[in-house]
Amino acid sequence: MSIARHHAEWLSLLEVSGPFVTMPVLLRVFPHGLDKDERDAEVARLVRMTYDEWLDSQQGLRPETAIHTQWLRFVLSEVLDFPSELRAEGPALPSGLSYTSPEYGETIRPTLAVLSPDDGKPRLLVQLYPKEQNLDKAISGRPWKDSPATRMALMLRATNVRLGLVTNGERWMLVDAPRDETTGFASWYATLWTEERLTLQSFRNLLSNYRFFGGKEDETLEAMLKDSASQQQEVTDQLGLQVRRAVEVLVQSLDKIDKDQQRKLLAGLPVTELYQAALTVMMRLVFLLSAEERELLLLGDPLYDQHYAVSTLRVQLREQADQVGEEVLERRHDAWSRLLAIFRVVYGGVEYPDMRLPAYGGHLFDPDRYPFLEGRLSGTSWRTTPAAPLRINNRVVLHLLDALQILQVKVPGGGPAEARRLSFRALDIEQIGHVYEGLLDHTALRARVPVLGLLGAKGKEPEVSLEALEKYKNTENTENHREHRDFISRPDSRKDKADSQTNRESNKESSVFLSGSQSSSVFQNEEGNTENTENHRKHGDFISRPDSRKDKADSQTNRESNKE
C-alpha cells in the first residue's frame, strides 16, 4: 500500500466537519506513514483494559463521575503523553480561561488545559461532558442552546487559543478555531481504538505531546492545520468540476422528460435558460448544505431530517440503492418533490406547531423564476397554481447529491481517486463564489450533428464534431496523427467503424449538451439514462456547434499548430 493510501485509509475512519489536515501536508510531515514507537502495543493494551473498565462504570443509573474523570486523565497522560506538570485543572487553571454567553449570561470554563513548558500559555483546552451528552446537540435543561462543540469554539476564540478537545469519554472531538477563519471539527471514537488500531495511532500522532512541544515548528498540529487551510484551492476546483457534471445529469434528465412529453415541457425555452435553471438548482443545494452544516436551518430536528433536509437525503437514497439497486431508484420520484418542498420552505417559510422556519425569500429560491421545474406554466404563481412535479427519478437526485457531497480526491502517486465526504462547513463564501463563476463560463447548446469531446489535461478538453474528426483522419499530417493516437484510432480499424456507427445511431435526434470556454459535456442520449453519462465521459466531453465561429477559429489554430 502506498503512503498516500495509508493516510487516506485512516482519514476515512474519522468524522470530519470543516477544514482539517490535507494529504500534501500529511505526506510532508509523515513521509513514511504514521509514526510508530515501542510503546504502541503497550498503549493499545492499556487502552483496551481501561476503556472496558470505564464503560462498565457508566452503564448504570448512576454513572461514576470519578472514573469518568480518571478516564480523561488516563487518555491525556498515557495515550497522548502529556505529563502532569503540563496539565492544569480546577483552581490551577490560568485566569481568563472562560467564556460568558452575552445573551444568556452562562459562563463556561475548560475542565483542564495543556500549558506550554516555555511560557505557561495554554495550547489546548479540554472539556469533559457526561457520556450521554451528544457533542453536536444542545445541553438539555439549559436556556443556552449551543452544542458542546460550538461552546468550545466560542471559548477558544474568546481566550485566543486555537485548539480544543471536547469529549464525553466515547467521542473525542478536536476543535480547530483559527481567528477569522472557518472552524474545523474532527472526531475519534474510543470504541474504534480497540477495533481499528489506525484510529488510535492517528489520534496519538496528531494530538500527542510531541506534536505540540517536541517536534519542528512547522510540524506542530497548529502549523499542519494552517498549512492545510492554504491548500483548499484544489478542493474548490474539484467541486466545480463535479458540480458541472451534475448539471449535465440534471439537464439530460430534463431533456429526456421533454422528449417523453413530445417536446412540450421545454417548448419555446432557450437552451441557455435551461442551463441556468439547472445551475440554479445546484447552487440552491450548495447553499442548503452549507446552511445545514452551519446549524442555520433545522438540521437535527427529526421531522426536518426525515422529510426536508438535503444533508440526510443522500444517505437515505444510498441506503435504498444498496438494498434494492440503483435501477429501482429510476422508478421512484419522491426525492425531487422533497427538494422542491425545501426550496419553497426556505423561500416562503413555514409556521406549524412541529416546525417553524422564517421566510428567507431571495432571487435564488424564488419558485416562479423557473416554474417548469415544478411542472407549472410560465407566468403562474406558486401560491395559487398547484405544482405538478417533474418525474425526475431518485437515481438522478442521488447522483446530484453524490457530486456535491462526495469529493473524488486524487491520491498522490497515481491510482484511482479516493471518495471522501466534503464538508461544506469548510467552504467559505469566496470558494462557493469561485465554483459559481466557473459554471457561468459554460452554457447549453443543441447539437444537430454527432459530436465528440476529447478529455485532455486540465483546461484542455477540445470539442470536435464527428464529421471534422473524419476529415482530419484523411489529412496529410500522418506523423502528427500518430502523436494523437490515444485520441483518434486508425481510419481502417474495425473498432473505429463500429464506434462511428454507434455514435451515428445514438445521435439521430438533436441533443442538448454543455458548452464553455474550456470544455463542455453531453447531456442527452437516446436512452436518457444517467449511467450513460459516464460512458460518454469516457470518450470525453461534448462540443459546441460545428458551424460556430469559435469552432472555425479553433480548427484553423489546430491546422496551423500542426504544420510543424
Image (spheres, grey):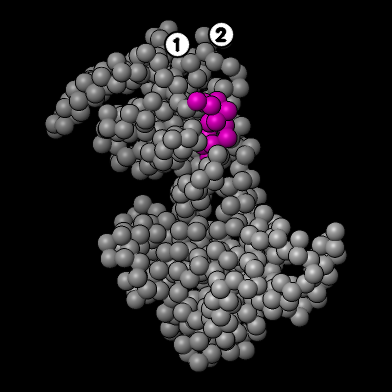
Task: Write down the quadrant of residue 149 in the picture.
Answer: top left
Asked if marks 1 and 2 touch (Cβ < 8 Å), the reply is: no
Q: Which residue is drawn at 62% across and 51% down?
A: 237
Disc 2 on helix, strand or loop? loop
Rendered view: 93 above or below 297: above
Label 1: element kind: helix
**Residue that protrudes farthest toward the front in the picture:** 492
- Alpha carbon separation for disc pair 1 and 2: 10 Å
Q: How many numbered callouts? A: 2
Confirm whether the magenta stretch covers residue 11.
no
- Residue 86: image tag: 1
Residue 281 shows in the view:
no
Label 2 amino acid?
Answer: Asp
Residue 558, given in percent of the width and then of the height, sits at 80, 65
Residue 74 as seen in the image, left or right of residue 101: left
Q: In which quarter of the image is the C terminus?
A: bottom right
On the picture, is 147 further left or further right than 471?
Answer: left
Q: Residue at x 56, y 39 (%)?
A: 412
Position of 108 with respect to 454 (left or right) is left
Residue 93 position in % (x across, y down): 44, 15
Q: Which mark is residue 118?
A: 2
- The answer to whether 37 is drawn above or below residue 494 in the figure is above
Residue 188: x %, y % from top left: 37, 33
Q: Quadrant of the N terminus?
A: top left
Magenta region, residue range: 19-32
Instruction: Identify the residue at image location x=35%, y=18%.
Output: 40
Q: In the rendered view, does 184 fall on the left or right side of 369?
A: left
What amino acid does circle 1 point to?
Answer: Leu
